[in-house]
Amino acid sequence: MAVFPATEQAGTVSGAGFELITDTAAHTGRFFRLYALEASVISAATVQNGSGNTFAAVPLPAGGSIDGVFTSVTLTSGKVVAYKV
C-alpha cells in the first residue's frame, strides 16, 4: 500500500483519516489540509472562520497543500487528499 506524503503525520494529529478527491463533485465534511497529489484546481471551497469564507479557482501545484478548516471542497481538475479533522 502506498503512503501519501504527510499521511502518517496527519494521522497523528487527528486520527480521523482522509478522503481522496479525484472528481468534480462537491465533497463535504471537516478537513484540515488539502494536499495535491498532482497539479489541481480547486473550483470552490468553503473555509470555516476564513476571511471571505469561500474561495474559487485556486491552483494547487503537485505536492502543494493548504491548511484551514474546510467544510466543502470541489475540484475542477486534479487529485487531492483531504485530511479529516
Image (cartoon, rainbow, N blue to C red):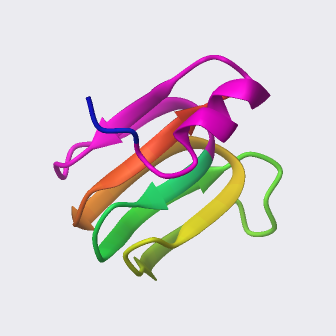
The N terminus - image quarter:
top left
Q: Residue at x 79, y 59 (%)?
A: 50
Which residue reaches farthest top?
15
The magenta stretch spans residue 59: no
Q: Position of residue 66 (x, y in %)?
A: 62, 64
Relative to 18, residue 16 above or below: above
Query: Which range is magenta?
Result: 4-32
- Residue 9 is situated, as x and y percent measured from the top left of the image, at 68, 39
Residue extending farthest front:
1
Residue at the image point whose x is 26% and y is 57% from the top: 79
Residue 40 location, quadrant: bottom left
Res. 46 visible in picture: yes
Q: Nearer the viewer, residue 23 or 57?
A: 23
The x, y position of residue 63, in whole percent, is 45, 71
Q: Which of the image's four quarters has the C terminus? A: top right
Q: Please tell me how many numbered marks the rendered image carries.
A: 0
The answer to whether residue 54 is seen in the rendering is no
Residue at x 33%, y 61% (from the top left corner) = 37
Q: Is residue 84 left or right of residue 12?
A: left
The picture quadrant where one finds residue 11 is top right
Q: Vertically, is 49 above or below 85?
A: below
- Eyeballing the image, is 15 above or below 74? above
Residue 5 spot, x, y in % from top left: 49, 52
Residue 6 belongs to the span the image colors magenta: yes
Nearer to the camera, 7 or 71? 7
